[in-house]
Each structure stands twice: as structure tokens, then as C-alpha cells.
Amino acid sequence: MTLPLMTRLLLGTALIAPALAGAQAQAADADLQQRGDAALDRVIVTAGPLGRRYVDEMIQPVSVLHGSELERRMAGSLGEMLDGLPGVTNADFGPGVGRPVIRGQQGSRVMVLDDGLPVADVSGEGVDHAVAVDSRGASQIEVFRGPTTLMFGSGAAGGVINVRSKRFLPTLAPSPFLEVDASYSPNGDDRQIDLSGEVQLSETFALRASGGLRRANDFSINGFQEDGQTEGFEGRLQNSSIESSQASLTGIMSDDWGFAALSLSYWDTDYGIPEVFDPMRIRGDGSDEYERVTADYVRADFRSEINQPLPGVSLARLSAAWTRYEQDETEFEFSRTDGSFEDSEIEATFENREFEARADLLHDPVAGWEGVIGLQYTNRDFFADDPRGADRGFYVRPNLTRTFAAYVIEERRFGPAVVELGARIERIHSSSDPVIASRVPGVTLADGSFLPQPEQIDDINTTALSLSASTIIDVGPDHHARFGLTRAERAPSPEQRYAFGRHSAAGTWELGDPDLKSETYLNFEASWERHTGPLRYDLTAYYNRADNFIFLTSEDDGTGNPVFVNDIGNRAGEGAAAGCLPGDGGLCRLRNQFVTYEQGDAHFYGVELGGSWEAVEGDVPLTFHFVADYVRGSLRDGGDLPRISPWRYGLGASTRLGDLTLRADYLRINAQNRVATAESATDGYNLVSLDASYDLPFDDVNASVYLKGRNLLDEAGRRHTSFFKDDAPIIGRAFYVGVRARFGGV
């Protein structure tokens, strides 16, 4: 599709929307006056382009977790917390890694924000890498489904997740307070505690602090760990233990002019990559080693909002963050004679230094249009290496990426319709270090040709342009209709361009391509929402056409299974992998799945439904909850894309008996038989959960105890979205008992 045609479509959407809504203008205005604010959903979204808005005012589909629903979903990883929301699934790599998937897209296409600015980790393309955000310390989580590139950049082509903490809330507590949330689960001996508090040092200045710990041993599962395994260890997810911690300290000044806050935070984690560990070969083909990942970051954040800073400007938002992120992947080796520990060595080291700053100006209405003008700058210095020797190199060469962007988003009301138009342009400059004397000279491709590893790659400059037009229409007092059309461009990530070698903890040998083109998305979606009354729901349908879509694919070895290579990329019968003798080490072991970044024209389409029905009101209310989603992702010239979420549906019910709140949920995850080359299918499974919470009768303390039951049917399901699905199922039946309390703050 050419740009002129795209422009005509965008303008057409903007012009047609008011016309469609005009006939209902007078009736809708009267209904709005009658219903008043009490009928509106009072949940406020903070990451929207035009400042704080109620959920039902947002033009783009958004799910918000807050209050009791956020507490109910609180879990050890972000992906686990969001799994089950309409259009959102979890691509885990064991319990230590939970990476969200939105509408079948994951990795660097789903941007995770920490209080409005991106999380500066290495989880974008590393399937075994944890998302470095303190999701358990969140006060609210906002999930934007679909392209959100205008505000946040090309990395938001699939969606945005904003984890909002308590650090930058502009309202100061009237008195000091302390909040605590502690829980325990016998499955994995999983212990978690989170603390947060505030003390006001003056009428306009306060200090806020938070901290948290998690400690867990190996988790229990139902059956064997590997798909198809019939002997050996059973009932335990080996090497799935987790240790993590976080802390932050924030100073905030808040007054009538606005607020300004400076925060320092620290986060670390140590988790295992689950695999069948059997050094003495009791089973016969177990591993005599396992991998663990340790990572940490130190981050400094600044946030400020200034009211009426200039004539014609209603609000200025300023934000910046600097992060130093480091990660090691360590291999632990054991004796095949007696199973004793022998040695450990770091096989991979990651470092990421990232600085991001943005400034937004919200202007007063001009000819009925109000909006935001913004600038954004990012500097990302990425380094990855195998520290065992200078000649080893690593699968991603060191690189530096700088991005500068400008954007404008404007909206105007036409009767019952609000129309939003937006544009963003960004310039991305990427440069990489030379790779000299690497022990990986090159790799043999599927067609038998040999691809040498280039010593030097030229600098790459990319310009990405995104445009959007959308509308939300009041249809009577109870309903909204939404329509949106977005053209978004996404530059390939550095990992997709510069990968060339083994990624040890992920068990892959990855091949990127410096000549990858930018992806172009044309996304159309329509929603119908009922936001008042006993029955509330949101139904969305979308179609996303992607040109030059980049995906990680495996090569078929001729039997339907993926090709495996040794540590330097040799196939079976080739180079160091041929004629192996005992003791030759890793160069003889074909332990790395060979995967390449490829491009093709693709499309994604699907539907999402979420809502609730208050069937009974009164002292013992009864509310039913329902959710369903379906996404289809495939190449337009034929063939399925890998790791696409299967369709799901779920039902739940909740009630309250005095101080006791109860909820039960059922979620059906269906089989996924539409698979890519050398990808295995997954069976369907059922998830049943139970939540109970009891408010304790204390006058001076707001406290409650709770019980959570997860996977009550003890299913051994495998997530199709996970690169790791054949190696590990979901954890088995688990119960969590905990307590929450708030002292002071009134």
C-alpha cells in the first residue's frame, strides 16, 4: 500500500466518523447529562497520550488492573499476572521468566514501561531473559492492545504495558504509612514479601521507599518434565528455583504547580533454566549440567508535571531514566561418576547502558483541537560476550543505537464523537563493533551454502513513520463504538540484525541479518463496548497487515524436527561435529537449536471479548465474569507463524459474604495445531483457580488474609507461545496463603 493511499484512508476515517455519529448527537448529549459521573468507570489510565483519562474515554482498547483485581492477580512475573486478559498471554521460560504476548506478538514488539518509560533490559529478543520490572510493587498496570507507536516508538508495534508504581503518585499521604504483602506456597516453598511506605517531611515534600524479596525452590509439576519423556525424574521441574529482590527510594515534591520526583531503584534476580538434570545417566540421556541466569540493574528516574508552564500550554510532562543493566548466564557442571559438583563458568555476559528522555507539551484547544506535542531521545549501548576467551565472541556483537523522535497527537469532539489524529517520525542510528578472530568463522545454511561471519558491518540509519486516525462514539448512554486505523513502521532490533552464534541459556544458535528491512503494519480495529449497567462488556475485532514481518524460525531436519548444531555452528557430520571422540567437549554436542531471523509478509487477525454481569445485587451479590480471544497469525503467501496463541475462553463467578470475598475462575486453553516449520503442536488444557480474601476486623489497620489456588486440576499444560514448551510444562497445583496490611496513612 502506498503512502498517498494510506493518507486517504486515514483522512477518510477521520471525516466519516463525525458524520456517522451526527444523527445521534442531541439524544446522546441528553443521555450523558442524565447518567452523570456515577455511571462512568472511574479507573484512570495514566499512559495515554493526552494525560489521565477514564478507561471508557480511551480510544484504543486498554485493560487496567488495579485495586482488588490487581491484588488477586499478583504473581511472581509480569507475564503470569497478565495471562488471561483479553488478547494477552504468557511466553514463559520457566517460572523465572514471564514475558507478555499481545495478539500473538511478543519480544521487542511488546514494550514494557516502568512508570511511563521503557524497561531497559535485554528481554526483547532473549527468550530466556526475565523482564526487569518490579511488577509486584505496582499500584496499577495498563495494557494497550495493538500498535501504540505514536507515543512510545516502533518497539510498541504489538502493544504497550505500563507498570505504574507508587513512586510518582502526585498526591502525598496525610500521614506516614507502611504497606506489607507477604505470601507462602508449599509448591516450590515459594516465599514472597513486599513492603512500601511514605513519610512526609513537609507539606510539599515526602520520601517513599519500597522493597521486596522472593525465594523459591524447584516447583512441582504433574508428570514428566519433557514432552514425550517416559522415565527418569517425575513430578519436579528441575532447576526452576528463583531468588529475586528489589528496592527503591524516591523523593517527591508536590504542590499546586505540579510535582517533581527523583527515584533510585535496584533489582536483581537469580533463576534457573529448567531442564532434565541427570549427570549419572540414571535415565540414560539426562544432562550433566544446567544453566542459571543472574541479572541486576541500577536505575535513576526523574518525573515531573508542571501545570500551565507557558501561555497556551496546559501541562508539561518531563521524564528521564538512566539504567545500568547486567546479566550473566552460568553453566554448572557435575560429575558423571557420582553426580557431585565439578565446576561452573560464565558462558555469556550482557551489559546494557540506556538513557531515555522525553518531553510532552499538552496545549490548550485551538479551533476545537487539543493535543500533545512531544520529543523523545534514546541512547542504548549494548554489549554481549563470552568471557571465557577473546576469540570466542558471542551471538550478538556489541552495538550502539540512538533514536530521536518527534510526535503530535490531536483530538476534537464532533457531537458524540471524539476524533483523534496522530503522527510520529523517528530516526534510528545503529552501529556495531567489529568481530575479529572469532572462533565462529561462519555457518552452513539450509541450501548448503556457507555464510561467513562479517568482521565489520556498516552503520545503519533508519527512518520510521507512523500515522493514525481513530474515533470513539457515544451511542446512547450505555455504549461506545470505536474505530481505529494505524500505519506503523518498526525498525529491526539490534539483536535481529547482529545475532551470529550460540545463546547458551536459551539453547539456541541464532542467525540475524544486517540487511533486514523495516516492518510496516496497517492495523484496523473496531470495538463495541457497554460500560454501564449490570452487564458490561467490550468486544473488539482487528486485522493487522504486516509487511516484512521478522520472525525467528527453525529449520526442518527432514523428519519434522528442528536442526541442532554444536557451539560453533557445525551440523551433524560437519567440521568439529564430525568424528567426535570422548572428551572433545561442547564442540561435539549438537545441543543448540539452529534458528534464523527471517522476513515475510504476514497478517494477524482476531477477536477479543471481556466483561461481567452483575446477576444479583444486595448484601450477597453475585457477578459472573467472561473472557474469550482468538488470534490467527500467518504468512500471506502460505504457512503459519511460530508460537501463536491458541484460542481461549473462560468463565468466572464472584461474591461477597460480609468481610469474605470469593471468586472462582475457569479458563480453557485450546490445542494449537497451526504450527510453523519444525514447530510442535500443543494440546489443550483447563485452568481452574480460586481466590478468597477476608478483611480483618481491626480499627486502626486495614488488613486482610487471602488464599489463592492455581491450576487446581493439576494440569500439565504447555504454553504454545513459549520457545520452551517441549522442555517444561506449567507448574502444577499451587496454593498461596498471605496477608496484606496498611498501617497509617490516614
Image (spheres, helix red, strand yellow):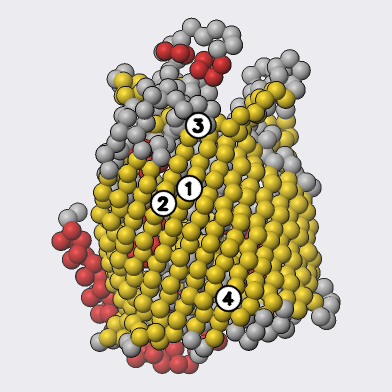
Q: Residues within 10 Å of mark 2 (few under 14, many from 20)?
A: some
The kind of secondary structure element at disc 1 is strand
> Which quadrant of the figure contains the N terminus?
bottom left
Whichever of callouts 1 and 3 sits on the residue coming sooner in the sequence is 1
Q: How crowded is mark 1: few (under 14 residues within 10 Å), some or many (20 or more)?
A: many
- Give the labeled residue for mark 3: 386
Residue, x 34% and y 91% (percent of image)? 26
> Residue placed farthest to the front in the image?
390
Left or right, 237 with reference to 428: right
Look at the picture and state if 469 lies above or below 637: below
- Give the labeled residue for mark 2: 380
Look at the picture and state if 575 lies above or below 268: above
- Give the labeled residue for mark 4: 252
**Distance Cα–Cα, label 4 vs label 2:** 27 Å
- Give the labeled residue for mark 1: 352
The kind of secondary structure element at disc 2 is strand
Whichever of callouts 1 and 2 sits on the residue coming sooner in the sequence is 1
- Amino acid type, mark 1: Asn
Dot 1 and dot 2 residues touching (CB under 8 Å): yes
Question: Residue 671 placed where, x, y %?
Answer: 53, 41
Left or right, 732 with reference to 66: right
Which corner quadrant of the image does residue 72 belong to?
bottom right
Toward the viewer: 566 or 358? 358
Left or right, 82 with reference to 195: left
**Distance Cα–Cα, label 1 vs label 4:** 28 Å
| Residue 99 in sight here | no
Question: Residue 235 placed where, x, y %?
Answer: 73, 34
